[in-house]
Amino acid sequence: MYVQPTKRYSVRSADPIELFVPGRVCLFGEHSDWCCQFPAVGNGAALVSATTMGIFARCRIVADGKRKVYYRSHLGDAFGKELDMDEESLRLSAGDPSNKLGYVEGTVSRFLNNYPCASFRSSVEIDNYKTTLPLKKGLSSSAAICVLTVRALSLLLLGRQLPVTEEMNIAYEGERLTPSLCGRLDQVCAMLSPGLVASLAFEPNERGEVDIVVREVFSSYQPVHILIVNLAGSKDTIKILSSLQSAAKQGEFEIRSLFGPWNRDIVNEAAQCMKCGGSDPNELGQLALRAQDLFDKHAQPACPSELRAPALHKLLEDRFVRELASGGKSIGAGGDGTALLFTPSASSQHHLLNYLQGELGLEAWATVL
């Protein structure tokens, strides 16, 4: 759960604040957030939950009168950067594919566009001192960084936390200034707490944009034991998204159906299973396998070099995985980034986690919904 501020902050306050933004795992419904904009697709739909892993930061005002953002990362290749609070220069810099801080710069740019910095006479320091969320693995790590940046700026420069929908909009617009082709699904990490599941709808509006409608936030009727597995493969998310969006734009029936009505059917079945406690503990796993089979059949041809996903399919076809998991699928854009496995019990989850880590040498994380 993200840390809610216990008081209003002002630009004169030097007190550091601790922030945490979780990642999010999409159980079902990837790609439906952008595909819903095309004719005859209908609304997008997804089931998502927050992870216990996330982005940690200490943030404070620096009363130096320079109007800068000092951002520090403590990842493997630790780095820091001073960013001038200049909306236009940050916007241009965010588009550089080699820019390590493009997500931050894009988000600061959009924040300043909404809240011009003419009245700001102090700088902001964002010290991302710990990151437990795997990066570039379909768990919204970049969106979490964008949300954290918006939250830090609003608390310290405006003295208040923005409504979560506004946080999400600024974070989304900031990430879209980078080469990322993300949809509206990723920034949902701003509104979730680990353990809760949100049923979402994505609805095109008259402005040509997509609105997120939170239909329901609920706890599963009975515990759902899942494993998130780092496949340690390579994938080009930008290429995947570009290829799929191009296919949808050209009117390919299979792509529009895959992320439209076929996806809605699976999401609705999964939500009903989780809310009503279906008698078959394997139902969610079987739905995951069904979703993956449809994705392989209809999305893979649009980007075969990235979506053949040999590591993913090797995992799903492993004899012990098939014995201990009820089913699984890729998460995120697809490909050999991250897999989601459903297990029918805490015991099978524990044994499978040991097998993945000990025998296959894969990073994996267990969680319960």
Image (cartoon, rainbow, N blue to C red):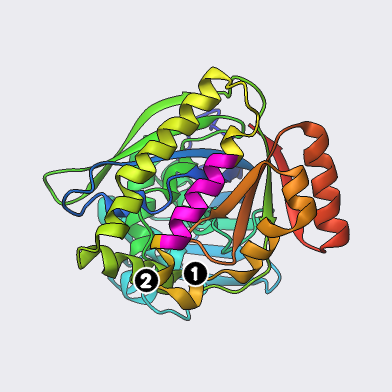
Which residue is at a point 38% across and 64% down the rendered structure image? 106
Looking at the image, is 61 positioned above or below residue 284?
A: below
Instruction: Pinpoint residue 49: horizontal percent, then vertical percent.
Output: 54, 38
Which residue is at a point 46% across and 36% down the rendered structure image? 191
The residues bearing labels 2 and 1 have C-alpha atoms spaced at a distance of: 8 Å
- Quarter where residue 203 is shown: top left
Mark 2 is surrounded, within 10 Å at the Cα level, by few (under 14), some (14 to 19) or many (20 or more) other residues, namely: many
Q: What amino acid is found at the position of numbered circle 1 in the picture?
A: Leu
Instruction: Pinpoint residue 29: horizontal percent, then vertical percent.
Output: 42, 46
Left or right of 264 on screen, residue 317: right
Instruction: Identify residue for label 2.
Output: 302
Which residue is at a point 21% across and 50% down the rendered structure image? 209
Looking at the image, is 230 positioned above or below residue 47?
A: below
Start-end of magenta stretch: 286-297
Instruction: Identify residue for label 1.
Output: 307
| Magenta span dominant secondary structure | helix
Instruction: Choose the circle earlier in sequence order: 2 or 1.
Output: 2
Q: Is residue 254 visible?
A: yes
Q: Is residue 54 visible?
A: no
Q: What amino acid is found at the position of numbered circle 2 in the picture?
A: Ala
Q: Is residue 292 magenta?
A: yes
Looking at the image, is 91 positioned above or below residue 52?
A: below
For the N terminus, the quadrant is top right
Which residue is at a point 36% across and 65% down the rendered structure image? 181
Q: Is residue 359 magenta?
A: no
Left or right of 209 on screen, residue 335: right
Contact? badges 2 and 1 (CB < 8 Å): yes
Instruction: Pinpoint residue 267: horizontal percent, then vertical percent.
Output: 43, 37
Q: Residue furthest right?
A: 358
Instruction: Pinpoint residue 252: horizontal percent, then vertical percent.
Output: 24, 63
Front one among 25 and 317: 317
For the C terminus, the quadrant is top right
